[in-house]
Image (cartoon, coloured by chain):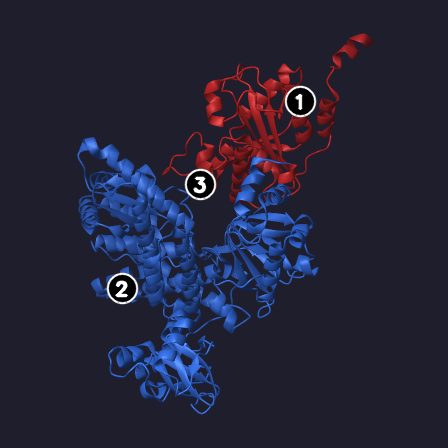
Chain colours: A red, B blue
Amino acid sequence: MIDFFKKKVPDYPDFWWEYENSFNEKLTDDLSAVRFVVLDTETTGFDYLNDRILCIGALSLIDKNIALNQSLELFLKQEHYNAETAKIHGILKDGGDSCISEIEAMEKLLRYLKNAVIVAHHAIFDITMINRALERNGLPKLRNKVLDTSNLYKKTLLTSNVFKKKEHYSLDELAEKFDISKKDRHTAIGDAYITAIAFLKIKSRLKGKGQLRLKDLLKMG
Amino acid sequence: MKNTISHRVADFLKNFPPFNVLDQKDLETLSEEITIIYKEKDNIIFAENDEPHPYFYVVNKGAVALKKGTDKSIMDMCDEGDIFGLRPLMAQENYKMTAKAHEESILYAIPINIFKPYAQKNTAVGNFLIESFASNTRNPYSQSHRGKLYDEVLDINPVGPNSQILDLQSVQYSRKLVTCSASTSVKTIARKMTEKNVGAMLVVKDKLPIGIITDKDLRNNIVTGKYPITTKASAIMVSPVITYSKNLTITQAQMAMMKSNFSHLCITKDGTPNSKAIGILSKHDVMVALGNNPAVLIKAIKRSKKIKSIKQIRKSITHLLQDYLDQNIPIKLTTKIISELNDACVKQIIKISLEEMPTKPPVKFAWLALGSQGRSEQLLQTDQDNALVFENVPEDKLIKTTAYFLELSKLINKGLFDIGYEYCPAEMMASNPNWCLSLDEWKKTISQWIINPGTDEVLLSSIFFDYNITYGDVNLVNELSEHIFEATKKYPIFYLHLASGALQNPSPTGFFRQLLVEEDGEHKDSFDVKRRALMPLTDAARVLILSHSVKSINSTAERFEKLAELEPNNEEIFMACSYATRALLKFRTKQGLLHNDSGRYIAIDKLTKEEKIKLKRTFKTIKEIQELVSIRFKVSNLLR
């Protein structure tokens, strides 16, 4: 019997447990104290099963401040490779010495993330790609709370019959709307930066009834 | 940690002093340690007397106002690339000013402990800092003194931009005196004038001004051959000199120049020719001092080749507006002048955008300002509402033509955004395919609104029907107006809907005649002057004037004046409405300038008793006009 239970405790590496334990700390509702990690992934394609992550870019955002020495940029070694998308991102299969293995990348990512609230544009895509990578390495899924700037943006628009909201708003559209330079578009960290500024601008426009709390944001998207 | 974003930060910084003298490697190391900070409008970055932060700041986007003292007058305005908050760190003292985001801004915070070694190591950086601090001796609270927005104000009145009335404002004259004696030869004089790059030379004797020689005198007397080039100054100088004391006001200077037909005045110690000459005032100096004069501003707008320079001029326009209000210049005149200036800005942006397009427009078009801008009632910058109409084209060309004008509209909308007009949250802008149509398409759309007037259609028409042409072909717009009149005549039921729409705004006062304030939301407890007071008047004027088929009068106050003329029996109430509209507009503008926003929401508890009475007086008029509209168009209670 005892053996049976012992088997149930999975054999995860230390960094997973560290990550897991960071969630024991309850998130504060005060938005100025919450740590957000704005991230973006560049991938070989849009197929969850066959495509792989090429690069992860992440910025940490606390109280409207982005400290650049607290950012993360990971390049992954590739087994699977799609020449078509590499053209867009300009990342080659052997990107040089800075490329690390998928498991190393996951370790670095989890150590960086901790219990932060993840912000991404069309977040479901990035989160699924990361979860697949975790799964391939025998790890459970991400546990972080997630905000999607695409959904949040829609909440800033007027609700009126006069004007139809679109189903999706691209990061390009947001950049144009908020006057953010698109120079670094299609690098993971560049997109993460655009997403971060867009997120801040959206947040300032969402001040509806009284003080905006994390709870409200999570409800919206 | 090296990454793409810190590269981008370095790319930005290297365009501005003192970072431009750092070498690339140092700059990149520095950039990696930077924190990017986002500030909403009116957020404080640091307050007066705060302990210094471990950072100083560079504006990446937006603008930051540095303010001082209890009256919080603006001492300096920092734009893209400007540094602020560095001096206290170097001097190790508390902040002497409050820094507040004047617009939504993105700042780079640069850690001082990383920056300091560079400043010490690199003499060019050090020199820049010393210079920028030294130039502060005249105004020790300003980080640096640049030829910008509040310059002239700082010179005259160090406590900030209070009302600057031209009649009282003393003029800035040139203290750099170039003089000669009566016996100097004109050749020497001409050479000296060229060397010093001045247009006039003062002839002095014992430091007293005895005559003046200008370019014109040299041309008339020497170049024509009337006198040889060896002539002495005394032969051709104009004498006596017109002298004034240094307290001369701009208006006085202008008058003196006009009266005497002289282009230069001499400033002496006591204002008489019998005291020491201390400066010269030229016509040019007066023109510069009149920088806040609409004629000069219009000229400047028309000369602008870049949208960025228009943005600077827009700031002067706001400044001018403040002056006009402070001086109690009739709001009717103020509205006219400011609207003209705003209009000129938009026109110029359209011109610039047209030049940016790869080809000329395929057919004629007109740019329409909608809403408050169309009514020429926009004193402060609010959202942009606009539309575009183009000449009818054969069906096979429609898609291509539409694409061209959408592209153009996108440029114009962006240009307007860049000078401070926010994008319309409901996308009522010409870059929206629904608002960029051919004449026939517009006619069709308008007919639909008029024939099936639901709530949305009434709302859309109430925004659209106040259009005013900003740029382009007038005939297109006239044809559109004719179409509206014809259609509304055919379907008079539309008036009823428009009228009921006009009555739907919430009442300004409650049962006990107290002002009704917003109950929730961001503007809780403030009074919505736009929705509760201005809009009922605007809506009433629109439906009434439309029913008289009067076109090309768009301003609400003027519409009421026209109505008073058309219906002498109702003259009294219409005139009252016209007056109320202007009073409310002034109210809103003053509030907006005070808070650097659209002025729509008024904090009731901040109003004086007198202001409250003034505000309430307009409500009686609003009620009366609503009754008139309700009876005239037989708006039943059901529809309301």
Q: Are marks 2 and 1 on the same chain?
A: no
Amino acid type, callout 2: Glu
The image quadrant that residue A148 belongs to is: top right
Q: Can residue B112 be seen in this snapshot?
A: no
Residues packed near mark 1 inside 10 Å, few (<14), some (14 to 19) or many (20 plus): few
Vertical placement of B400 versus B243: above or below? above
Q: Disc 3: which chain?
A: A
Amino acid type, callout 3: Lys
Q: Are marks 3 and 1 on the same chain?
A: yes
Rendering coords of residue A221 (x, y %): 54, 32
* Residue beneath the point at 52% across and 33% down: A191
Residue B561: which numbered mark, if any?
2
**Sequence order check: which comes first, mark 3 or mark 1?**
1
Nearer to the camera, B108 or B430: B108
Rendering coords of residue B553 (x, y %): 25, 58
Vertical placement of B216 versus B18: above or below? below
Residues packed near mark 2 inside 10 Å, few (<14), some (14 to 19) or many (20 plus): many
